[in-house]
Amino acid sequence: MNARVLNERLQRTLPGARVVATRPSGCREILLYLFDPEGLQGPLSHDTAQAVVAEPAYWSFCWASGQALAAYILQNPATVAGKRVIDFGSGSGVVAVAAAIAGACEVVGCDIDENARLAIAANASLNQVEVTVSSDWFLRLGDVDVVTAADVLYDRDNRDFLQHFCGAAPDVLLADSRIKDLADDRYQLQATVDGRTWPDLQEFEEFNTVRIYRARRG
């Protein structure tokens, strides 16, 4: 798996676009195939803009919370070392890759988007680690030691997953920049860090503050 396949997928909705191997500013230990702003020239046509909105290539960006959680795992490798980890809503796979680098015995990057799964596999290969990809969170096989998730609470309906995560594994690591109060006492704040999506989307400043939580059973 390499950038060629990802470029083909990206160009289905955004002609001329491409990914390039990049080290996100918030987690420079990891190399990812990410959207290259230099590849675009001029404003998007109406049809192209609609296509991008209908099928956003979110996997080609490394969101602030993903960078923050990946960096946290690399700084605290004992959270995943020797454990089976499932990364929910994996996107580019940055957190899954970090878990593999930190010594997890198995890492599964789970995402419903086919292109994201291609990106996860490509980015794992780029970093010379092994990450299994999965399309269905509910079809996970075997025991799970740690669930990781970053930037998955943007939709209010997704908050139900806070309960699912705790039921799936005895340890949950969650990073989010959208919700200031999870309203769930199981999730204890571990750190608050500043971060920006890479490449920078010039988001509101409030979305550049990432909170990292941990929920543990027993």
Image: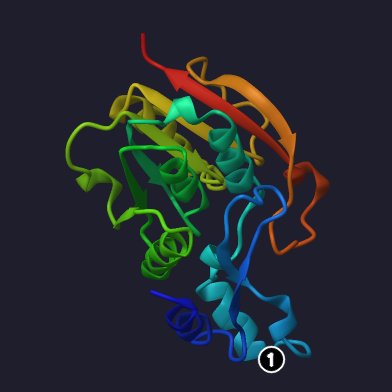
Q: Position of residue 118 (x, y in %)?
A: 39, 69
- Classify residue 172 as left or right of residue 169: right
Q: Position of residue 64 (x, y in %)?
A: 66, 48
Residue sticking out furthest to the left: 142
Residue 88 left/right relative to 10: left
Above or below residue 104? Residue 198 is below
Residue ID at (39%, 34%):
147
Say which of 9 and 95 sits in front. Answer: 95
Task: Provide the secondary structure element on which disc 1 rests.
Answer: loop
User: Viewer-proximal residue, 101 or 57?
Assistant: 101
Q: Residue at x 62, y 44 (%)?
A: 65
Quadrant position of residue 50: bottom right
Q: Which amino acid is tagged 1?
A: Ser
Q: Quadrant of the C terminus?
A: top left
Q: Quadrant of residue 47?
A: bottom right
Q: Which residue is mark 1?
A: 45
Q: Position of residue 24 (x, y in %)?
A: 67, 56
* Residue sitting at x 40%, y 54%: 129
Q: Residue furthest top?
A: 218
Q: Residue at x 65, y 48 (%)?
A: 27
Observer-nearest residue: 166 or 76? 76
